[in-house]
Image: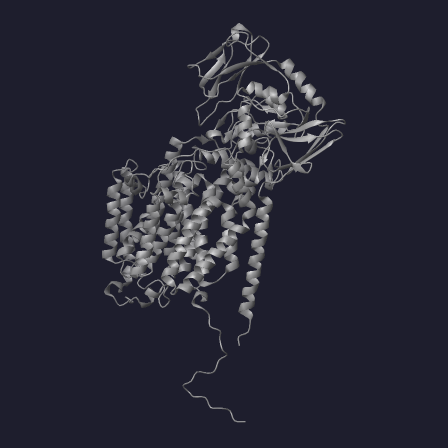
Amino acid sequence: MSTPLRSPHRPPLRPPVRSRPESARRSPRRPSLAGSALAALLTTAAVCAGDAAARVFPYGHRHRSVNDLGNQFVPFHAHLWDLLHGRARGGLLLNWQSGYGTSFLPDFGTYLASPFAPLVALFPRQDIDLAVYVVTVSKTAAAAAAMAWLLRTQARGPWWAAGLLGASYALCGWSVIEAAYNPMWLDGLIAFPMLCLTGEWALRGRRFTAAVLVAAVCWTANFYTAYMATLGAALVLLVRVVLTRAGVRERLSAVGRGAATTLLGIAVSAPVLVPLFLSSRQAYPGWSRQFRPVPWADLFARLLPGTYSFSSPALFVGTGTLLLVAALPFHRGVPLRSRLWWTGSAAAVLLSFQWTPTHLAWHVFATPNGSPYRQTFVLAGIAVIAAWAALAGGLPGPRALAAGAGVLGAAALAASGSPLATDWGLALFCGGLALAAGAWWLLRPALAAPVSPGRASSPEQASSPERASSPERASSPERRRLAGPAVAVLAAVLAGQAAATTAFGHRGKLGGLDDYPSWGRAHTARAAALAGAEGWPAYRTDPSRPALSGNDPLLLGGEGGAYYSSHTPDVFTRTMAALGAGWTSRGRNVQSIDNPVTDALFAVGARLQPDGTVARPETLPLVTLRPPGPAPAYGESPFANQELLLGARVYEDPVAPGVCRAGTEAFLWAPEYNANARLADGPAFRLGGNPPRNRAALQPLGPSHGASSALVFEAPAPPRWTLSCLDRGRLGAAVAGLRARAAESVRMGAAGVSATLPAGSEGTAVLAAPAIAGWTCNGRPAEDRLGLVAVPVAAGTTDVSCTFRPPGLLPGTAAAAAALLLVAGLALWRRRQRTRPSH
């Protein structure tokens, strides 16, 4: 058989290749790690330099733990350390250490679900402040690296440019000023570029399963900022779709893939999210405020380095980045549609900050308590992406750079009328602008060609003229040799401005917010005393007051009544307030009650004293039995309420106004009083009432000696106050009576409790824990007796078993399982589609 001749001009025959849709074409080559590494290193150096300049922990004597960082986040990370090392009371579902027993999964999802949080386990427990600082810096560096990776995924470009812009994003004013002491917000800083990356995968029809998992991790780490990051990433995806895809079908397919991966990722995180949302609804109401946009002068002032305000958006992202963004509308090397869309997106997001409906949309339709511009990091991210788009056509020319500098100069002029602007902040801005403009000009030879030559990232870029032959692009060896120093100048400007902003932010926070000491000798001494007095589950050990933080039981140890969280249950706050507890943060930071009656009721057998000693009050087991009868209800007096819960009269009225009978102990209830009070022959005690933010606790004043122990207010007497006198003999008899019919044995588990009652028990078994939703006892939902978990006990019942499961855990788990099955099914189907032979 003869072999057929082949034309010398015809290419050799090849097996047929299945065509792939445009959306499934391969993306530009995988970005190198160099840009991400540069971004992370520059970010770390700038943050640490700013902290060192401010001489805050761990570089100096000043406290770093301001506001909720020291009051909430450090103690919660300490509790995570205990969980990871097997030393915690309770488990992932139930926390026995705070609030006399409260749900932990919502707190875990709010404060500790970040993949970075377990790093604290690598440090000694006494270095918990340092551990949280390392976690904070690591998150900031990770956000910089993620942004640099995203930029080079969107379009090719110099790794050093991506590194500089990635660092600029992570060092934005919002990050170094606000999120630095709210470390869980930094998960949102990471989530924005990661969710934008899943958008890139959706754009190309790739990595569906990975995109779902990324979305799940982002939403689990911190749902609040992940929600904002998702809105921003959706906007970025829409712009990318419009600029890079033609045809309604192809655009809708990309958007649909992005939406599907995000929704499935959220569903996978449902075992944490659903209990968290339900817990938020059951929490004590926080502070609600009316949104008012800031003056435009203040808004422009926050573009400057070295500004601080708790109630305006920290817009600073580095003048090198701002110059590229401002020059973008005038940069003719970038297609007009790209200029309009990216500039318009940044402007639209900025304007959304100042309009109430869009402000509410950013914050899940509720104005937050303090810091009303928590979405600012999204604008920083979009600005950085717009700056990268400006580099897509080569660096802006002299006219575009001059126009951009003029725009920023006008913004600085407008900012000069704001009280937030400082002279040295304006000097840093103007000096940095001049240096950045010069550096970008010197770098024009290094960026002479478009970012993605021959591989346009949009239909418009495919037809845009190459300007490599332009005289401006002709470069001399001398100018190319200046590229390295120019990059160093840009890095120095960014790092210097960010470090200055970090240091200035510390000054503002320390001057206007509460601060809490890092772990020191006082912490060590208290923790040792609590550990030495430990007797759980026979009794509780309470760190008491004065407290070092709002969550001393988590930070120091014990099983106390203090608790501060966004999820502080409404039933707990109201119950403790009825019994005389004080609070701060408008009821979400409940303090321990230093009172022998409540100590007995909540099984507190050891209470730490201010001098470091441990008091041993009379106490009851954690499970007691109350006689049958109608359900009682609290009244106005905390003294009467304590007696109602105890079931006996133990207080008596003063024998004369402000004078207790000799031999009794005086207790003052003045919840609105904010000054010292004392017995005439005793020491003074500070009451911290300041309604509605703070409520003063029921205060023990000491033993009364009769007329010589008259009550003395060192400021004008409050409008509402009561002095009552405790008879210790009556209290001892009441405790003995309850102990006689209390549980014979109590066994505490990570998510429940079981007890054995005496034979012949009948009535209501009461667990000394707040009746939060989720308790089930003896196969039925637990009841509520005066705010505590209660179980009806029929005649002949001797065993009580209660388990706790956060509401929403089972539905959330079911949703996650269904989502994972769907993802697995889709992944299998896509794999078969790729391997199916063509016909």
In the foreground, 415 or 633: 633
**Relative to 96, is 522 on the left or the right?**
left
Q: Which quadrant is the N terminus positioned in?
A: bottom right
Q: Nearer the viewer, residue 604 or 770?
A: 770
Q: Which residue is pictured at 59% across the width and 44% down the height?
A: 809
Q: Residue at x 67, y 28 (%)?
A: 764
Which color mode does the image show? one colour
Q: Height in image: 338 above or below 721?
A: below
| Residue 637, horizontal then vertical, whole percent | 54, 19
* Left or right relative to 595: residue 754: right
Q: Within the image, what quadrant is residue 797 found in?
A: top right
Residue 325: x percent and y percent?
Answer: 31, 52
Going by the image, does 581 lie left or right of 228? right
When the figure is inspected, residue 552 is found, relative to residue 809, above or below; the finding is above
Residue 709 versus residue 158 in the image, above or below: above
Instruction: Decide if residue 615 is in sight here.
Output: no
Front-most of residues 624 and 1: 624
Q: Residue furthest bottom?
A: 1
- Which residue is at the far top? 707
- The residue at the point 41 percent across, 62 percent down is 251
> Looking at the image, how many numbered discs can be counted on the residues?
0
Q: Is residue 421 visible?
A: yes
Question: Which picture quadrant has residue 600?
Answer: top right
Instruction: Please state if 140 lies on the left or on the right of 702 as rendered.
Output: left
Q: Position of residue 92 (x, y in %)?
A: 60, 41
- Looking at the picture, how far across and down is residue 808, in whole percent? 57, 43
| Residue at x 59% of width, y 52% of height | 817
